[in-house]
Amino acid sequence: MPHTENAIAISGTGLFTPPYAISNDELVTAFNAYVARYNKAHAAEIEQGTLQPLTESSAEFIVKASGIKSRFVMNKDSILDPAVMCPRIPERPNSEISVLAEIAVHAARDALKAADRKPADIDGVLVACSNLQRAYPAMAIEVQDALGIEGFGFDMNVACSSATFGLQAAASMVQSGQARAILVCNPEICSGHLNFRDRDSHFIFGDVATAFVVERADTAEGTNSWEVISTRLVTKFSNNIRNNFGFLNRAAPEGTGAPDKLFVQEGRKVFKEVVPMVSDLIVHHLADHGVAASDLKRLWLHQANINMNDLIARRVLGRAPAADEAPNILDEYANTSSAGSIIAFHKYSSDLPSGAIGLLCSFGAGYSAGSVILKRLAASTPS
């Protein structure tokens, strides 16, 4: 079908799913065992009123609060050990590929195959994610090397919005002629920064990696290619989602092991502030491009909380969304940070016909949000 002159497209997507899954029941069993140990060990302080007892969690509470039923992780046993409650992922020697780069490569190969592209067709690699394994060398350069891609690579972090911000950066570089095609990877080992002993958040995150190829629409040959009609980004500073872990921690040893060195959030404040911010972003973005809500065939939203997604979709569409209009992968994958909306797009886009309009949106810490209007370029190949 015809496309806009100098148009950019997502020509293929990829997904790597870790080998282990943890159900809500498994997670709750481990959490409640920890609670029992803690309350027993501090029974005297609790009885004296100098310490509050910990409260048990439940699978029903998790589903009601988030819509999450399960999650995939890189390491399972130690997360479910009440004495550990943290993934154990051994360090690798520098001569071996790092674990974050490895899962990015798995997703990248999937995306390259879907786009019908070889490493020689790619001029740049972006690793856009929340949880970078190290400061340097850039993970993107390691992924580039592992895949045998010439050109350049760099990392970027805008928390859960990293994928849409990465898409904007990639699209701009292709449109300017800086590159023929860019590979964007979103590897997320979110279990590494999750406090599994915090009742309000112990269930939120899972591990995964996604990737996608960005190139000119007139060169896209993937069977599920989508023109990038428009992107819009917004950020607004907030402390309501934060992680203070970093290299300067060694300069302040008094903070070692403090809860703020893991993921922390003020969930109710986040809900109250992010929903209108994201809804307004999408509504105004669509209006500025003459796209009516009724034109949207699908919303691929950030997968953080089913209640947030339902409310955002309702505000955008002006009604409650049908299940297939705003697909939910939270029940299987949980919150996978920057990768969440890409998983939804990867799994629930190929069924739409040529010319279909959809919207990809991610949002999270910062606050940050990215909105992308997409149009299907090619129908799926019949199986």
Image: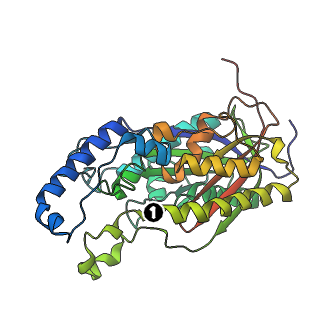
Q: Quadrant of the C terminus?
A: top right
Residue 117 location, x and y as percent? 62, 39
Q: Residue at x 34, y 74 (%)?
A: 247
Q: Residue furthest top?
A: 383
Confirm whether residue 158 shows in the render.
no
Residue 65 location, x and y as percent? 47, 48
- Closer to the camera, 235 or 326? 326
Relative to residue 334, is residue 117 drawn left or right? right
Query: What residue would you read off at disc 1?
Result: 138
Q: Residue at x 24, y 79 (%)?
A: 253
Q: How many marks?
A: 1
Helix, strand or loop for disc 1: loop
Relative to residue 45, is residue 10 drawn left or right? right
Q: Quadrant of the N terminus?
A: top right
- Closer to the camera, 6 or 164? 164
Q: Residue at x 44, y 51 (%)?
A: 188
Confirm whether residue 366 shows in the render.
yes
